[in-house]
Image (tube, rainbow, N blue to C red):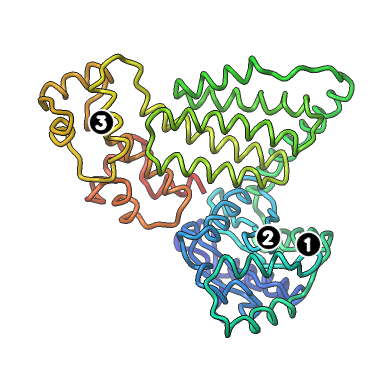
Amino acid sequence: MEHFTLPPGTKSGTPEMAAKIEDAIQSFCTISDVPVTFFNTNGEIEWECYKQNKFCDLFDIYRDTHSSCFKNLVSSSKLATQLGEPYVFVCKAGLVKIAVSLIINGQVQGCFIAGPIIMGGLKESIITNVFSLNSIHFDSYPKIILFLRNMKIFKPKDVSYLATLLGNSILAAITPNGDYSSINSQYREQRRIGENLQKYKKEHKTMPYPYELENKLIDSVKDGDAKTSLELLKKLLDEISLVEVGDLPSIKTKVLGLCTILSRIATDKNLSQEQTESYFYDMNVLNQAVSFQELSLLASNLIENITQAISTSTYSGNSQIIKLAIQNINENYKNKISLKVVADQLHTNPSYLSMLFKQEMGLTFTDYLNQIRINRSCDLLTNTSLNLIDISIQSGFDDQSYFSKVFKKLKGTTPKDYRKKKG
């Protein structure tokens, strides 16, 4: 097995620290019989411990960056970073995994994923899910079932202990470090507020649903005002928690209903099919949230994405030509489109379209097109491990250098630094 090394450029990350982390992980694996994998910030596997015990390695879907399995890992790694503590989640097959983000001096270096783990017992649904997710030859069935039956089974409480042990092992290896305590203190404060909200609700039993606040949030999203939308969302979630006495399934039902409305609004704004499909995928992930804090984070991310997309595609004027031009751009931004191409398709003069576009939208045709493309690249930078060349191509830019230049102009930072900041 190769030795664990910290990513190049890690501030204050010494070989001695890397050795301490490796020793801590090996100790955890030896005691628990649970494999641990380290993923870099691009979602790529950098290091594995107890690889022989890792069930996932039997399948190609595990390393496919376009699979639901990979998206689940990336999303869980991001949530572990936001929570600042170990995050226990269930994979698509029904097996349990533990994510612990590696943060050194304010910079996310990657994420440790422990598992997969069988919790409670080997259910028939797990075997069914494994076979439905993967293309498996009949001859491999006995090997896979035997591997599953030989895996150690943990009680739910034991999984919680494993998460604490793994998190503390990593934290001890990189001490002193104030990053985790800073993030976790925020998380604990949110939990304290949640407990107070439940107490308040019990003392004030008749509390109506905050429809007025919900309508303000919907209007804010329609206006493309991301900052105000997130502020209103926080207030709305707090009040919904009061109304439902902290009951997570009931809160989740209300939030999913709201997100469904907002997703339909996004669809009506002529956003691309790819964008709207991603919102419904995010809602499916939101439905799997296991805590109010996780639900809040996921809802905030989803609403921020919808609002930002709407802000660059909203047109409330009366010009049918501009409406069609915007629809054309939103649907074809990945292709080689230009002012002349769109003008030809709309049977109008390019100069006239250029003048009308600037007059109606307050920005040029090219500036609007670049905004749409950059927004798409932000989504890819945050939710995939694609390299910058692939991201620039999938966002509609043929030239990576030009893509980086436009990105820096619109976002005030480089694509690489943007990805680091978003974790």
Q: What's the residue type where badge 2 is placed?
A: Ile
Classify 10 Å Cα crowding around label 1: few (below 14), some (14-19), many (20 and above).
many
Q: Secondary structure at mark 2?
A: strand
Where is residue 210? Give x, y as percent: 69, 18
Label disc, if present, on residue 273 of the rendered structure: none
Disc 3 target residue: 367
Please, what secondary structure does the residue beneath circle 1 have? helix
Q: State the residue lying farthest toward the right.
A: 203
- Nearer to the camera, 2 or 356: 356
Q: CA distance from mark 2 to mark 3?
A: 43 Å
Q: Quadrant of residue 38?
A: bottom right
The residue where tag 1 is placed is 159
Secondary element at tag 3: helix
Label 3, residues with CA under 10 Å away: few <14, some 14-19, many ≥20: some
Q: Which residue is mark 2?
A: 98
**Sequence-first disc among 2 and 3:** 2
Pointers 2 and 1 in contact (CB under 8 A)? yes
